[in-house]
Structure formats: C-alpha cells, structure tokens
Image: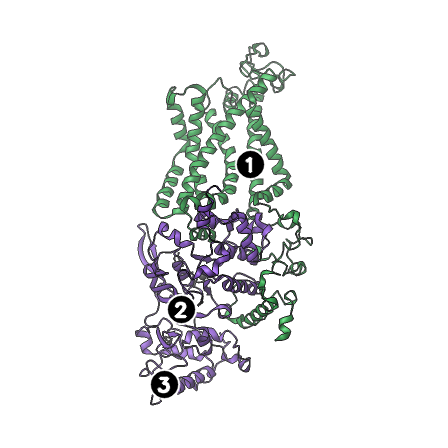
Chain colours: A green, B purple
Amino acid sequence: MSQLAHVRPALLPVRITESPKPHHGCASFHHEVFQLIAKALKTPGRHGPVGPVSEFKTTATAAARGSAIVDPRGVNLTVTAPIETTGAEAGAQPEAVLAGVKKSQIEGRSLSQIAWTRFKRDKVAMAGGVVVVLLVLMAVLSKPIQWVFDLDPNKFNQDLIDPALLAPKGGWGGMSWDHPLGVDPQYGRDMLARIIDGSWVSLLVAGGATLLSVVIGTVLGVVAGYYGGWIDSVISRMMDTFLAFPLLLFAISISASVQDGFFGLDGLPLRICVLIFVIGFFSWPYIGRIVRAQTMTLRKREFIEAATSLGARGPYILFRELLPNLVAPILVYSTLIIPTNILFEAALSFLGVGIAPPQASWGGMLSNAVDLYTADPQYMFVPGLAIFITVLAFNLLGDGLRDALDPRSK
Amino acid sequence: MSENPKDAAVTTPAQSAGAQLTKDAGPGDVLLKVTGLQKHFPIRKGLLQRQVGAVRAVDGLDFEVRAGETLGVVGESGCGKSTMGRLITRLLEPTAGTVEFQGKDITHLDAGGMRPMRRDVQMIFQDPYSSLNPRHTVGTIVGAPFRLQGVQPEGGVKKEVQRILSVVGLNPEHYNRYPHEFSGGQRQRIGIARALALNPKLVVADEPVSALDVSIQAQVVNLLDDLQQELGLTYVIIAHDLSVVRHVSDRIAVMYLGKIVELADRESLYKAPMHPYTKALMSAVPIPDPKRRGVKSERILLKGDVPSPISPPSGCRFHTRCWKATEICRTTEPALVELKPGQRVACHHPENFEDQAPQETVLLSAAKEAAELVPEAVLEESAETSAAVAAEVSEPPQEVSDPPEDVSEPPRDTDDK
Ligand SMILES: Nc1ncnc2c1ncn2[C@@H]1O[C@H](COP(=O)(O)OP(=O)(O)OP(=O)(O)O)[C@@H](O)[C@H]1O
Ligand code: SF4
Ligand SMILES: [Mg+2]
C-alpha cells in the first residue's frame, strides 16, 4: 500500500476504457483501477485534486490517444474543433489540452470567432460574401452613385433608338462609352443606371421580407418548440395552413387589389410595403419550422435544466440560453432565403403586380424584355445577369456560412 | 455600490460555508425527507392526446437525507434514478407523495415559490457536454447563479467566480473561455463550480462521473469528496454501478424499477446485502476482502432484461428475475422494513437474514430458471447464512426457502448466453 501512495498520478495507466458507462461485465477491472487511482491521487498531501489537476494529463498522453485535434504545442487546437461538440467527438479531447497554453491565449475564442476562421478559408464563400457586400453597397449608395456619375435611370434618349425597330441603334444593345451596359429599347434609358436603381428595390424587398419572416418565424418557432403542448399544436397547424396557401395566386390578388392610399401610403413605398408583407408573411413557416425543431432539441439539453434549477424564468431561458444557440441556423437560413425572395420579387414584378413603372426593377425589366425580345434580344441579358449574380452570391455565402457554423452538415 | 451595507446583507461568502450550515440543520438532522414519492409520465396517443397509460418512472419512494451525509443511489439504467433526482430538486413535479426540505413542504411549489429554495438545492448533471451552454463563457456560466438569484458577492461576481474556479481546480484565468475549449473532466468541474456557487446545502449529483474517462472519474469523485469536507455539503449521488458510490457514500439506496429495494449504511450493505438484487449488483463488483478476492465464480448473472416500467410486475417487482421468488413474491408486494438497525429491505426472503415468509417454500418456475444462472456457491452460502441467522434470531431452526433439488442441479456455465 505504501508503494501505491507514491505512484505519481501521471504514471498511472490513464487509457483504460472508452466506454462512458462500464457494464457489469467489465466492472471489476474498472473498479480496481478506480480505487487505485483514487487512492494514488488522494494520498499526497490532502490537497486532493485541486493542485495537479489541470496538469494531470500530459500532452504526451494526449498525443498517444491519436486525437487529431491536438497540436503538439497545444496551440491551434480549437481551429478544427466542431462548433457543437457532441459527447463522442469531444470525448476524444484530452484532459489537459489547455495545460500548455500560454498566457496570451487565455482569452477564449468564441464559436463565432472559430466560424470566422473557418469561413475565411472557404474561398468560394468568401467570393460570394464580397459580391454580396458590393451589391449591398451599390443598393445603399445607389442614389449618390447616380448623382456622382450623372446617371439618370429615367432619362429618355430617343436619339439612340431606331424608330422603325424600336431597338437601340448599333449592335450589342446600344453599348457605348456613354452607356456601358447599353440602353433599353423603346425609350433609350441607360441600362447601367436602371440596374443600379433597380438594385435597391430588389434588395430592400428581399431583405425586408426576409426580416419579417425571420422575426415571425423565430418568435413563433421558439415559443412552439419551448412550450410544446397545445401551443405547439396551434402554431404547427398554423404553419401547415400557411404552407398550403397558393402563395403566388394570393400574392397576385393582394398586390393587385391594394389601392393607393392604403395605410396612408401610395406609389412606390406602398408597392414595396405590399411586396415585403406578402413575401415575408407567407414564408415565415419555413424558418418557423427550422427554429421549432432546433428549439426542441436544445430544450432537452441539460443546460436548460441547469438554468431552471437556478431559478431562471421563461424569458431568461428563451433569450439568454436558447436564442444565442439559434443565431447560427437563423443566419444561415436567412442568407439562403434572400435569393429566393429576390426571385419572388422579380416574378411578381414580371407578372406586373410588383414594382410599377417607371421605377426600374430587375423583374420589371425582364418582363419588358419578353415583350420586346424580337426587337432587342440582348435586353433580357443584363437584368437576367444581375439577378443571376445576386442569387448565386447569396447562395454561396449562405452555403459557406452553414459549413463554417456547423461543419457536420457537410 | 452606493448601497454597500445592503449588499453585504445578502452576500453569501462561500468561505464561511461550514459554519453557516448549522443555521438550519445541524449535522445528522434530517435535511430532506421524501414520502411516497411518485412520478408517472403519461403516455398519450392519437389526435386527441388521450392518455393510454403511464411510465411509472418513480413509484413510491420513502427516504430521508441527513445533513452532512452522502446518500448514494444505485440501480440499473431506466430504474428512475434521474427522475428521482429531478423530483427532489423540483425540476419535475411529483405525481404523488411529498418532498420536504428543511421541514418545508416543497412538493407542489411553483417556479416562483421554488426560487428562494434553488439557492439551497443544486444539481450536478450527468453529461458535461450538454450541461454547459456552448455560447456562454465559463465566467457567464459560473456567474449565472449570482445573477439569477440576485446575489452580489463581496468583491464582485467576477472575483468570486474566479475564486470558485480555483476551488474546483480550474485556472481562474480561463474565465473568458468557452466550454468547447475544455475536456470532459474540466467541463464537469465547471458544472460543479456552478452548482456550488451559491453555497447550497444539498447537492444532487446525477451520475456525475459516468460520462468521464476512468482516470478522470477518480479525480472528480475526490474533488466532490474534498468539497464536502470543506464546505459541509450534503450529497445525493446517483450512479449506476456500485464502485463510485462505495467510494463516497455513507448510506446507499438500491433502486429497482422505480422503487427502493434496499436502503442501508454502506458497511452493512457491503458486509451483508439482504436484497437478492443488491447481492446480484454487488457480485459484479469485486470484493474488497483480500481473502475472498478472485472468487470470480460468485458472479450472479440476472436473467433477462429489466421489465418495462409501463406495466411493472405484480407483487415484488424483482420476482421475474429473482432466483428465490415464491408465490407470495408474485402476489404480495414486500414493504421496505428495517430488518436490522440501519438496514431497510423490501423482500420476503432476504439474504443474510431470517426468512420473512418461511411458509413459502415452492419456487416459481421462473425462479428455477433464474437460479440456473446463479452460481452454486451463492445459493449454498445464502442458504447457510439464512439458516444461521434464523437460528441466531429465533428459537427453532427454520426451513430454508431453497429446496435442495434446485441447489443440487449441475451448475451451468454462466457464459452460455
Ligand atoms: N420526460 C419523460 N417522459 C416520459 N418518460 C420518461 C421521461 N423521463 C424519463 N422517462 C422514463 O422513466 C424511466 C426512468 O428514467 P430515468 O431517466 O429516471 O432512469 P435512470 O435510472 O436515470 O436511467 P439511466 O441510468 O439510464 O440514466 C425510463 O423508462 C424513462 O424512459
Ligand atoms: S425473494 Fe421474493 S421478495 Fe425477495 S427479491 Fe426475490 S422475488 Fe422479491
Ligand atoms: Mg439517468
């Protein structure tokens, strides 16, 4: 026994079993080892484990376990670690992974920092992100840009139009140094100016609709998932009902029936509000379902019980414990439905119930182009390309975000 | 900070923990008392969510926990240990029975009524990976108790959290780290730090180490042990095997299918387990007595699986797997009685003690099958001790419950199935 007392903890066999719950079959071995280690750890100096704990497992032991996460210097270890480690994955992390970490690294790296590191390595997603940022800048600054470069989306240039064909004079849709993207048929308006002016409409409608659906979907999804029971039943049936709606027909009839003066709005602001409302209000169940499912899995986690056992109230649990864990899926899903909403706005404008002329909008331009494609086939390329690039960029960004935030989804 | 005197009044510095404990319950006084505790989870089916049955997870528990002691609770998976833990911490509301903490009935207190109690009753959770919010720093997690209970510790929350971190053996400078940056053992220490932050009186630990590597299990158990001595804590420690519980418990409750079948001091239980189920559980753990080490043939294998808690067996719930079961076991439920001082058992034919139903001699056919899995030595020994105790306790030597033909059957190789 006296020998046992002098066994240094680090010399003891540490890798006995991976099984978290030893069965009775291996209990005897388990028990002996347990007793042995318990004694060996206890005997020196009554400090118990308080002293040598964090240094207990050497990095060598860690390396011996073949964990890919461990950098020999104990530095970079969190970079490849999954955002949400499950028991099994994180079980592979050695005890004193942090033992060798220097003071400079004491500051913790949050999950978003890790996600950012991962995202930066994804070149495609980064490209998508850059394009998205540029598009947003273009949309926000569209009026100043037009002012600085003296672009007027609504200025007619009849002199550039062939009066017989209604098409722009010269090839390539009338491209020239004055009009880099050409002019539109019939009126000869500058395409670049119209694309820039249409961008803010597209993004505002898509962004606003997304925001609306995210807010409704998150609130109702969290409530349904957290409280369950009849509240969940009611909200879930509501989602089913909304999803069963013939959305396009409904959107068309609403948009068409809303007259000027509704809510004291008219003209363009009214159209934009109606579009945001119609698109956002009918697409919230998609995000609502995702949030509900996520909430239901999170609710069973023990940290929720821990908060309850400390006397936390419902709002604290919803906003402080649950919501931070929902930000990632909500963010990813939002970036993925923005392009859908852009397309939807374009479709409504295309069908003539979206943005009314003369305001430039990408969908409206496409719609015009279809009427005039015999005269000027090139006309549909420019707005089509704008929509395509925007949708693609948002999708790439969303995919990259998802991979960065939840690597297991790959 | 302007209302410093007021702050000081609500401060609960953990340093003075040991002294404060005596305020309400001195060591040895009953801290927690549970009577007839039941929890039935309804099973609902169909469109109308009609109740078609119930999982009788906990079905009538009586026990008490005394201040300063450690009560170990063991039992197979699914026998209702976690449910019991959640009932006494009032994370679940009991279906029936009462829970009294420091003489106060907390059985049906609502969330608001429980809030002040939460300071005194804390829980350590089983899974260190799901018990810490991945989006919160260690500082936030361990500081949450202060924020939620409105307690302003001396020197500020941050300082107090760092002190607690060092008490549980973590680097206080890791205050700003996130849980994913820690290993399982370290995470469990964070969970312990959170549970101890408000200096509770009763700590319920639900399998605090079963998710951890064996080497780390010992460290964490030792930590719990040290903290108990330093802070005068009272523990209810739940475990599924006896090795962890033996190390720390003063008393041990053995659960089977939602009931306590034996509740005894550690010494009594290990020296002479009375319930056949306890005996079976213990046979899986090596005997500390060096003279008897290596007698591996004494391992008792139980027949079949644990029956469903939805429709538990009649009478004694263990009768479907017990090798001593007789007709009375099938029909009459044995009460949990104190047969020896400090040892309560619910069995008609206890081991190491006088038979409680000596008139019953015919084994159930299931018991005969079960007995085939029980080593001969165990059966003989049980017959011997029962007879000896019986002779000792009462006048005429009584009939032994095991008919000789069963004992003399050729012992099968226990690894057959
Ligand atoms: N919320 C619930 N709803 C329905 N049934 C439940 C619920 N919680 C537990 N049960 C059931 O109650 C029984 C006891 O469960 P409990 O978690 O208490 O067992 P345990 O002894 O802790 O097991 P383990 O060792 O696996 O943790 C099980 O049959 C389980 O399926
Ligand atoms: S002898 Fe009877 S009462 Fe005792 S455990 Fe076995 S079945 Fe239950
Ligand atoms: Mg459990």
Residue B73: image location, x then y, percent: 44, 67
Asked whether the viewer can see residue A70, the reply is yes
Q: Residue at x 50, y 36 (%)?
A: A337
Q: Dot 3: within a 10 Å radius of its alpha carbon, few (fewer than 14), some, or many (20 or more) residues?
A: few
Q: Amino acid at mark 3?
A: Val
Q: Amino acid at mark 1?
A: Asn
Q: Residue furthest right?
A: A73
Residue bearing mark 1:
A395
Q: Dot 2: within a 10 Å radius of its alpha carbon, few (fewer than 14), some, or many (20 or more) residues?
A: many
Whole-number angstrom distance, CA of label 2 to CA of label 3: 28 Å
Residue bearing mark 2:
B256
Q: Nearer the viewer, residue A144 or A351?
A: A144
Asked whether the viewer can see residue B138, the reply is no
Q: Earlier in the sequence, mark 2 or mark 3?
A: 2
Location of residue A216 (image quadrant): top left
Badge 2 element: strand
Residue bearing mark 3:
B393
On the same chain: label 1 and label 2?
no
